[in-house]
Image: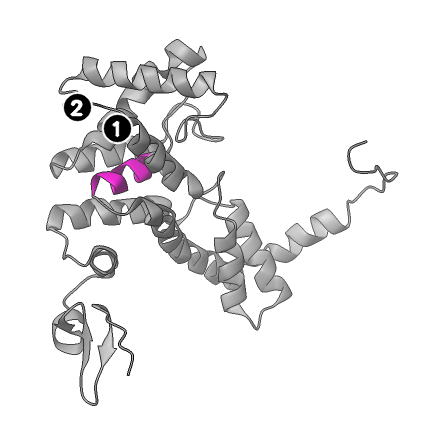
Amino acid sequence: MPEYPTALGASSLDRITLLGQDLAADVMGEVGFGELAFWLATQRRPKPGETRVFEAVLAALADHGFTPTAITARLTYLSAPDSVQGALAAGLLGGGSRFLGVTEDCGRFLHDVLSTVTGARPDDEAGWDALALSAVRSAREAGRFVPGLGHHVHKQGDPRTARLFAIATEEGLFGPHLSLFAAIGRVHPQVLGRTLPLNGAGVCGAALADLGLPLELLRAFALLARTAGLIGQLAEELRNPVANEIFLSVDLNNRPVPPRPYGA
């Protein structure tokens, strides 16, 4: 018979195990959901400081107002109120390069820069600034954006960024990814000619990378956080619906124009 090994959930007649623990006795009521999510992804129980930073990331990414993901979830629920899973899925599918996906993009960008360092990594601000300056210049010369720079609302600074920097510092988890990200914030005006804020999605990617979480899953953690936010959006839609107004605003104000062939 084939075998399918797993260290995650397994059931017998009278017992369920999860991560080598008895689910009912050792996990339920004993382990918080954020801690469990970290544990499931890494298969090691996080230290209290790691849990605090990880849960701060989840809180930072849970909801950010009427973003496209929130609007999509509400409109889908308007169209198919019998399918709450469809509304949640629709919102999550919008987590891409402009919203939520920046968390993964930033973590990967920082990791790629760090992988170019030969020998010891910088140990002071000047060293990090030099590495960041080189990275921003290279991205600019290649015509690429630096993930994590800029925000359409928080032009003077994203409040999540400073707070996550502080929490990581308090827990002794301000690692190389956060150090490089902070340096990018200091030096990028020299290359771009203007000052852009370090956004919350980017700092979350840096923090998750410093926790040693798989780069391939960074967007998944952003989606985990946003799932809670989308549930909140749908709950508010039940109490105070706005989706129909959004729909009618577009539907009743469309303006017919002549067809324009693609590429014309």
Kind of residue sitting beneath label 1 = Leu
Residue 39 placement: quadrant: bottom left
Instruction: Decide if residue 49 is on the left or right side of residue 85.
Output: left
Secondary structure under tag 2 reads loop
Name the image quarter holding residue 170.
top left
Q: Is residue 176 left or right of residue 222?
A: left
Image position of 17 with respect to 133: above or below: below
> Can you say which quadrant of the picture contains the C terminus?
top right
* Secondary structure mostly taken by the magenta-highlighted segment of the chain: helix
How packed mark 2 is, by other alpha carbons closer than 10 Å (few <14, some 14-19, many 20 or more), is few
Q: Answer left or right for 166 relative to 70.
A: left
Give the number of the disc on residue 132: none
Residue 95: % across, % down? 47, 48
Magenta part of the chain: 203-211
Residue under pointer 1: 114
Q: Earlier in the sequence, mark 1 or mark 2?
A: 1
Q: Is residue 68 visible?
A: yes
Colour mode of the rendering: one colour
Q: Are marks 1 and 2 in contact (CB under 8 Å)?
A: yes
Which amino acid is tagged 2? Arg
